[in-house]
């Protein structure tokens, strides 16, 4: 899982270079072991975070979780320091997205030592889960990831128009249902009715609010059929973008056929070699 | 964000022309500022409209909302008058869709001064939100918008057939469930059962009505599997239309046919070579 | 809305031919009026059928509905007799699908005159709604209708395999949840759990049954993610069939290009005229 | 429904060969009858299994179900023995997937004769339903089945990336809702909130947990709109894969590459002309 260096290392000092190779790269055996261990620790600490909030467990094992969090934070802090000391351009790392996430992973614990604001800052720790992206160099997955992102970016304009129409439609429907249901049956205000409209048009359908009047039910039938059909539009947009950009289509120099796949060596229409 | 003039202006009078450029066009700096301010005001007034209906807020801030609505309506009225006085073909604007919406945006307030029918006419004001389409000249978005509309129009016939089948299927299923559940468990009439059938086949599934008898549950399983699969049909129709009209349709120089695909070298109607 | 004669008429008798032209065809003015009237009557009688089951209305207007049904049945009976007497091959009509539906539309009323089994046989009358297919000759819609049907038939084998997997998956999941929830929380038997599995995997999600145990919720998360993703498979099957059979693709005799649309007169690749 | 022999038979003994032909193959009349009977028995026993768990029926007909299970197990055991004695490579069958399922189909009953662990092991019997795959030789369905599997395998990488993003998004949203709803309204822990997030983003929407605070409802609106739109991504991935491998992939005679599309004239790997 080779990856290009992200940051400039300090080449002269052998020990700094060694740390860099272990922490940032995955060529060496130490690098791989570091990556696997870090991945396991990230997943383990996230699971701890989630389980910690279960009331029964919180009551009984509060101390154990605190100690676990203490040790995990120490390990992540050591890792953070290691990442900093072995590179030249330190600010580039500290203010990069991954650097900020690494920082937010450890800072809540230290804050909590001084300020009694544990609950909220504790949740920031959940962002640790984003660190798995570092572990997965995505070298093999990069092509497919870029493919999805590229297709989404090219279709983004059509999606914005679609979303704009959806928002306007939802607000008008919400206001209409508010009047039809007379402000009752859960439709106590336009915001509540808009919430119902979103729940319905996305076909989630909690049922916490649902129309009680006949006219309301008739209107909701129209909303449901719309939501059920409209899903075809963004799906069609995204799917046709996937088809347009099937990887990087290569054009044959002889016959001009653009329909060659990105791993083709010969044109499928005329047989000409592809450069 | 340049846009073609919608209405004939009165070119002689300099001040009328100036107003026209500001209100209808977005080339000048004044025009851009006007557009942004109007957009902010539309969004702000729509949010006010929605928040105004929350019972707690309605009780406490009724006066403030009334004053806000008063001032907003004054501003919109001034804008409406400006739009009228600077063009020649006034009826063309007044009876155009955007013109009617502009009118409906301000008239409820004036009506409420004379008639105590505030609640319903107040909702008409929500149509203000459609005015954002005026602000977004959609010059950049026009191509993609037309693309979606064109694809939908070409696939509309297949969608009508599909909807016809859906309606007939839903009515028959509703009647069947009404008999199976014996008019109980919420299936108190065929219209209620049809409402349940729509809720189920669109996979919304509120749960306000759900079958209680074993046969009813069996029948509902069939309905759910149908609804789950049938969504593939309109999605397939829309997606294949998006694929057919992949981006810019090319117009033939000889016969004017616009229906050529973007990889066509010869016009499919007259055979003329496409440049 | 011209349509080919379905049944052999009796050409000698002028009045029989006239009735045939009016009832079965839509060329003449009388034929068109007949069609429109029949369509209105079908829709009106179906709406009556649905509204009749609303308890409040059933109590108060029982008599009026009975009389309406009486007259409607008389009119449909006259129409049925007309359809029979003006054709030669009578059995062909009587036992054709549309003929059976026409018969079932009127027979419940007559049965109810002799047997007190009104409720169930009344529902058979809802099949009248299928008669709208006769009115819509679908001459214009025939092409698109056949297109959808053809695409579905060609993809049917893949859909059967898909459904087979779904059924097996649903039964196993249902049995598993039954054990995990210990036969409680609504999962009182495997059939009930299978019902829950269908409600969940189709994303309908009534909420009448939902897991209460942590393991049950974990298992349901897997089921939901599967159902959410699996919808892509039948959609993909149907959509790719729609793409394959874009109407009847015509092959160019000169260059062999198969990518011509069905309304093309010239090949889009080489410009050759299409026969 | 001819199928290739799965296991080496013992060709010398005529009676062993006869049994093999009946049990494993479907060419002979005996083979076909055997297959049909087995299929009916599998479906019948699975239905029995499901119905057996309905409380009312379990109370009343416990004995009858026990006897039915006894006889069915005897028949399946005889079949298992037949399958074993007529082949040479017995371990190959016993440890093959189908062999293990056949074993698990009969072993629960025997276990229950010695250990009172009926309830759980009884559910293992539901795996019998997987045995239908043996009956359906899928000779005709094999092509379409491989088509679906092949398309899914080629798109699997993109699907993994998509699922990874989904999981991370769901965990973060769950944690956020937990804080926003303050650990109340059903959001009693992060795992519960993650369960709600999955229920919502897959649009299942049970309604057993739904946000009560305004901020929670606002956040849920965002989650619902995301779930509603995101479904387009896996659908687009799978659909475009179906399109790429449109029907029969053609194998190149020179280099053996099977990855040529069906409209290719030259092999894309070696350039050899495709017949």
Image (cartoon, coloured by chain):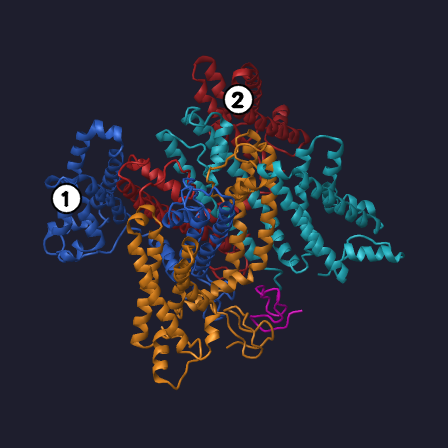
Chain colours: A blue, B orange, C cyan, D red
- Magenta extent: C251-275
Is residue C183 in the magenta section? Answer: no
Q: Position of residue C10 (x, y in %)?
A: 86, 54
Q: Position of residue B188 (x, y in %)?
A: 56, 36
Label 1: chain?
A: A
Label 2: chain?
A: D
For the question of whether residue A162 can be seen, the reply is yes
Q: Secondary structure at mark 2?
A: helix
How many neighbours does mark 2 have within 10 angstroms: few (below 14), some (14-19), or many (20 or more)?
A: many
How many neighbours does mark 1 have within 10 angstroms: few (below 14), some (14-19), or many (20 or more)?
A: some
User: In front of the other: label 1 or label 2?
Assistant: 2
Residue corresponding to mark 1: A77
Same subunit, tags 1 and 2: no
Which quarter of the figure has residue D212?
Answer: top left
Which quarter of the figure has residue D47?
Answer: top right
Left or right of B127? Residue D69 is: right
Q: Does D10 sit above or below residue A143?
A: above
Is residue C266 in the magenta section? Answer: yes
Left or right of B226? Residue C36 is: right
Which quarter of the figure has residue D185?
Answer: top left
Q: Position of residue A76 (x, y in %)?
A: 17, 43
Q: Are marks 1 and 2 in contact (CB under 8 Å)?
A: no
For the question of whether residue A155 can be seen, the reply is no
Residue corresponding to mark 2: D52
Measured in 3D between alpha carbons, the distance from the residue under mark 1 to the one under mark 2, in whole angstroms, is 58 Å
As drawn, the residue found furthest toward the right would be C12
């Amino acid at each position: 899982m080779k990856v290009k260096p992200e940051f400039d290392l300090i080449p002269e000092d052998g020990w700094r270079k060694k740390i860099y190779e272990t922490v940032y790269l995955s060529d060496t055996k130490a690098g791989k072991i570091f990556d696997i261990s870090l991945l396991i620790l990230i997943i383990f600490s996230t699971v701890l975070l989630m389980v910690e909030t279960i009331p029964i467990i919180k009551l009984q094992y509060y101390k154990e979780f605190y100690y676990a969090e203490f040790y995990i934070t120490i390990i992540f802090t050591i890792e953070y320091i290691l990442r900093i000391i072995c590179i030249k351009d330190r600010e580039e790392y500290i203010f990069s997205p991954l650097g900020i996430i690494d920082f937010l992973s450890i800072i809540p614990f230290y804050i909590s030592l001084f300020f009694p604001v544990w609950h909220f800052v504790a949740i920031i720790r959940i962002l640790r889960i984003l660190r798995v992206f570092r572990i997965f160099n995505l070298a093999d997955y990069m092509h497919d990831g870029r493919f999805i992102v590229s297709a989404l970016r090219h279709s983004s304009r059509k999606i914005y128009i679609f979303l704009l129409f959806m928002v306007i439609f939802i607000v008008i429907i919400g206001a209409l249902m508010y009047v039809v249901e007379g402000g009752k049956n859960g439709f106590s205000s336009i915001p509540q009715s808009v919430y119902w409209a979103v729940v319905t048009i996305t076909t989630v359908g909690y049922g916490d609010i649902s129309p009680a009047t006949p006219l309301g039910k008739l209107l909701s039938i129209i909303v449901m059929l719309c939501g059920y059909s409209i899903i075809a539009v963004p799906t069609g947009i995204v799917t046709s973008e996937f088809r347009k950009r099937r990887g990087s289509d290569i054009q044959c120099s002889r016959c001009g056929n653009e329909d060659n796949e990105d791993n083709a060596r010969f044109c499928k229409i005329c047989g000409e070699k592809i450069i």
